[in-house]
Image (cartoon, helix red, strand yellow):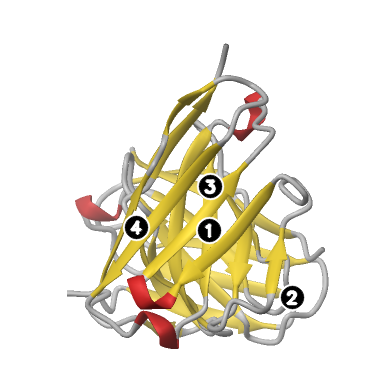
């Protein structure tokens, strides 16, 4: 199985800050990586697919990059509604696996 | 509106069974592969089962293999998860999600809570 390691697990930041979350895969997954946002009590929401493709309706303050084994999700200027938990997910092969999540909280 | 709605969750004793349903609307269900995921309380996301468009190809996570069975009825725009031999560790919110192969899962249903407890 492909393991995904996200860092950090917890991030405290302020509105307007720029933050970056990293996701490392245990083996190469090309660009078959997605990022999700999840708010308490809600289903995950797909933000970015294929490592860097922003989904329709997702603000341009979100961006993704990387390929192979190292990927990043960047939020260029945090808004209050961005405080949530973020997960990376690999779609290279089954079993589909997720990173452990990064909880982004307001400082 | 593209929508998935799960139902069938509830409280069940260890060793018991439960059948979850996922009703799809707003898109051509028979054109999409589907999956089930779950999230234990306070924990991360876990993929548990995949089914192909025709239903002939199925993948299961090791954690549920031999106990859970995914199925679909394209005529009824519905996805199912038959859960047998339930354990305490199966307690979670269960989500169905539409797959875009190699791209991601969107949308997800709102989730249905399964609690396994005596």
- Vertical arrangement, residue A20 with respect to residue A49, above or below: above
Element carrying mark 4 = loop
Label for residue B109?
4
Which quadrant holds residue B117?
Answer: top right
Label for residue B36?
1
Estimate the spatial distance between the alpha carbons at disc 1 and disc 3, rounded to whole Å: 7 Å
Chain of the residue that carries numbered disc 1 in the rendered image: B
Q: Earlier in the sequence, mark 4 or mark 1?
A: 1
- Vertical arrangement, residue B26 with respect to residue A18, above or below: below
Contact (Cβ within 8 Å) of mark 4 with mark 2: no
Estimate the spatial distance between the alpha carbons at disc 4 and disc 1, rounded to whole Å: 10 Å
Return the residue nearer the eye: B28 or A48.
B28
Contact (Cβ within 8 Å) of mark 4 with mark 1: no
Give the residue number, with chain letter if any, for mark 3: B38
Residue B24 shown left or right of residue A103 in the figure: left
**In the image as oriented, which residue stretches furthest toward the left?**
B1
Element carrying mark 1 = strand
Neighbourhood count class around disc 3 (C-alpha, 10 Å): few under 14, some 14–19, many 20 upward? many
Residue A52 in sight in this render:
yes
Chain of the residue that carries numbered disc 3 in the rendered image: B
Estimate the spatial distance between the alpha carbons at disc 2 and disc 1, rounded to whole Å: 26 Å
């Amino acid at each position: 199985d492909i393991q995904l390691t996200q860092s950090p697990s917890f991030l405290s930041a302020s509105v307007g800050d720029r933050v970056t979350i990293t996701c490392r895969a245990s083996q190469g997954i090309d660009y078959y990586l997605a990022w999700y946002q999840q708010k308490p009590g809600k289903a995950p929401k797909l933000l970015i697919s294929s490592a860097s493709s922003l989904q329709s309706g997702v603000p341009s303050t979100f961006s993704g990059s990387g390929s192979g084994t190292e990927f990043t999700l960047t939020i260029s200027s945090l808004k209050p509604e961005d405080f949530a938990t973020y997960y990376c997910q690999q779609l290279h092969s089954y079993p589909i696996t997720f990173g452990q999540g990064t909880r982004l909280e307001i400082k | 509106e593209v929508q998935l709605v799960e139902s069938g969750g509830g409280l069940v004793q260890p060793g018991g069974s439960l059948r979850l349903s996922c009703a799809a609307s707003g898109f051509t269900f028979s054109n999409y592969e589907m999956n089930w995921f779950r999230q234990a309380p306070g924990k991360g996301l876990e993929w548990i089962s995949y089914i192909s468009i025709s239903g002939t190809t199925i993948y299961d996570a090791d954690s549920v293999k031999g106990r859970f069975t995914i199925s679909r009825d394209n005529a009824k725009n519905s996805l199912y998860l038959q859960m047998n031999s339930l354990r305490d560790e199966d307690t979670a919110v269960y989500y169905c999600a539409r797959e875009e192969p190699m791209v991601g899962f969107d949308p997800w249903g709102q989730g249905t809570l399964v609690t396994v407890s005596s």
